[in-house]
Amino acid sequence: MKSLYSFYVFVVILLLSPIITLSCATKSPVLYKDGAPLSISEYEKIAQSEFDNKRYSKAIEVYEAIMTNFPDYSKAVAWAHYEVGFCYYVQEKYDEAEKYFRIVINEFQEPAANKLAQDMLAKIVEAKK
């Protein structure tokens, strides 16, 4: 009797796990509080969490919120572009990644971001061989 109960519990868990996983995976990150944008550091923390959990499209969404809500913060916007490029790079979407790395190099005077973007462009060239 106990093994039959265990079997039923196992089946229920097995059947519900894709639903639970799907509901957690599709939840969008919170990008605004009371209609106002979050701070840049809050966005960066959320984006990093999404990236760490391999939810790259969600991380990109958060970095785009930085670009949209803080266009006058050149350093933050440059790094947001770099991070979007990196999200595409780890997904092997090299053409998209290249686009963002080139934006960092051509449109921003942020030396560290420019150097890393140049390094990533070299890695893309190698990956495409």
Image (spheres, rainbow, N blue to C red):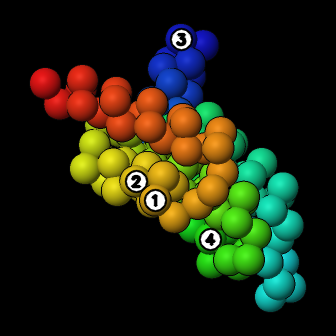
Closest to the observer, 17 or 53:
53
Question: Which tag is nearer the camera, tag 2 or tag 1?
Answer: 1
- Judged from the image, the secondary structure of the residue bearing numbered disc 3 is helix
Mark closest to the chain's N terminus, 3 or 1: 3
Q: Amino acid at mark 2?
A: Arg
Q: Which residue shows up at 58% across the image and 60% down it? A: 108
Asked if the residue at tag 1 contacts the one at tag 3, i.e. Cβ–Cβ closer than 8 Å, the answer is no
Asked if the residue at tag 1 contacts the one at tag 2, i.e. Cβ–Cβ closer than 8 Å, the answer is yes
Mark closest to the chain's N terminus, 1 or 4: 4
Image quadrant in which the C terminus is located: top left
Residue 82 seen anywhere in this rendered image of the structure? yes
Of the numbered discs in the image, which one, if any, rests on residue 62?
Answer: none
In the rendered picture of this protein, how many numbered marks are placed on residues? 4
Of the numbered discs in the image, which one, if any, rests on residue 3?
Answer: 3
Closest to the observer, 99 or 60:
99
Q: Residues within 10 Å of mark 3 (few under 14, many from 20)?
A: few
Q: Position of residue 116 (x, y in %)?
A: 54, 35
Of the numbered discs in the image, which one, if any, rests on residue 106?
Answer: 1
- Judged from the image, the secondary structure of the residue bearing numbered disc 1 is helix
Q: Position of residue 1 (x, y in %)?
A: 56, 14
Question: Which tag is nearer the camera, tag 1 or tag 4?
Answer: 1
Q: Residues within 10 Å of mark 1 (few under 14, many from 20)?
A: few
Mark closest to the chain's N terminus, 2 or 4: 4
